[in-house]
Amino acid sequence: MRQFTHGALPAWLALGAFLPLLASSALAARSGPPPLLGPDPLRIPPKPGPPRLKAPPPPPPLMETMGVREGDALPTAATLDVAQTLGTRFVVLPFDALMAKGSPAAPTPLEDLRRRKMTPVVWVDGALDETTLTAAAKANRAVAGWVVIETDTANAEPTPATYAARLSAVAKSVHAGHPNTRVAALTSGTDLPRLRTLLEEGALNEADALMFVVPAEISPAAWKEFLAQAKALAERFAPRRVTPLWCLVRDSDSDHGASLTRLALFNYGEGVPMTLWEPLGADGKKPWPGLPMELSTMARQVAGLRLKRIRELPGGLHGLVFGTRRSDLSVLWTDSGAADLKVKLPEGDHAVVGARGETLPAVKGPEATLHLTEAPMYVEGRMDILGFGE
């Protein structure tokens, strides 16, 4: 056997002992100097990007944008029961309701609405003095979200300048008593020149919203045009804030159910946060009994559904899509007359419900033709538009 003397190592053993040192030196050379403690002073920080915008909140359910008014009277318990069943949110109260005193056995109208989780819309005559208004607002601080509408004087139609000045005084009084209360200027009809004059006189200096009173039989095209111009005027005279546009629909005939639902659907698609319905009898004062079948049908069909999108359709045709993540319900109607709409649907039968709740013949996928009218139609199933007419 070969012998090695003390102090002498074979070449292969000496090289093996030296290899780890070579490897660590190479690794150190490749990785560079040790990292600095803290931020690198030579590193240029990235430029900050634009702030991330929060997605707008989803719109409330359709029926939560609707309400009812029974003229100048307190709504009856029967009316409130129906409104609550439909899921409507707003109820109009006369100003006297703010000053009413209740008891555990007989709650005030405001307490009753709060118990029902409904929002009062208080109708205020502009002739009331500021002291009374401020006291009423302070007395009702506990009522969350109540809304005051400032109306024209009942006895005489004021000039735009007089009305705007009075409106500002009333709004200041109400805001002083309840800062979260929204005060709206009331305008009758769709008189754009008068609206422009009101805004020029400062109607939106203190008011928070605009309320328009229109008949149920108003032309859809006329209302669409007026609403667009009213939005433009509100943006011009109050550019630093969004001015809600509210709508009160006065209905003098129970046959206007289709017009009412059509107007409510259109307003909802346009982002109108409040559409009030005021049913009037033939004398224009007493509410007629009963509820339009079209309104109750609309409430049942969209219950529990959210607005998913607005359909892009040619002039005179309208469509909203409600639903959940897995299902769609299309609501379709025309401004006037009839029209055919060719659609694509999944295979199988799809239920169709008419404006008054009647069951219509089901449509079969993958392709079908829908016959639209002024009365809204409700069609189940995911749908694509293929064409129009024959």
Image (cartoon, grey):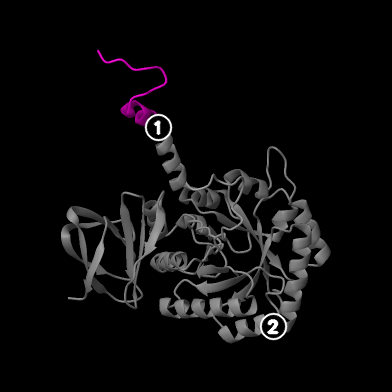
The image quarter containing residue 22 is top left
What residue span does the magenta drawing correspond to? 1-19
Between the residue at mark 2 and the residue at mark 1, the CA separation in whole angstroms equals 99 Å
- Taking depth in this image into account, of 246 and 359 the one nearest to the observer is 246
Asked if one can make out residue 50 in the rendered structure from this viewpoint, the answer is yes
Residue with the mark numbered 1: 18
Q: Look at the image and say whether residue 136 sits in the magenta stretch.
A: no
Q: Are marks 2 and 1 in contact (CB under 8 Å)?
A: no
Left or right placement of residue 169 versus residue 32 in this view: right
Numbered disc 2: secondary structure = helix
Q: Nearer the viewer, mark 2 or mark 1?
A: 1
Asked if one can make out residue 290 in the rendered structure from this viewpoint, the answer is no
Residue with the mark numbered 2: 160
- Residue located farthest toward the top when viewing the structure as drawn: 1
- Residue located farthest toward the right when viewing the structure as drawn: 131
Q: Look at the image and say whether residue 8 sits in the magenta stretch.
A: yes
Q: Position of residue 59 (x, y in %)?
A: 48, 58
Q: Position of residue 373 (x, y in %)?
A: 29, 70
* First in residue order: circle 2 vs circle 1: 1
Q: Position of residue 322 (x, y in %)?
A: 37, 57
Numbered disc 1: secondary structure = helix
- Seen at 59% across and 55% down, the residue is 75
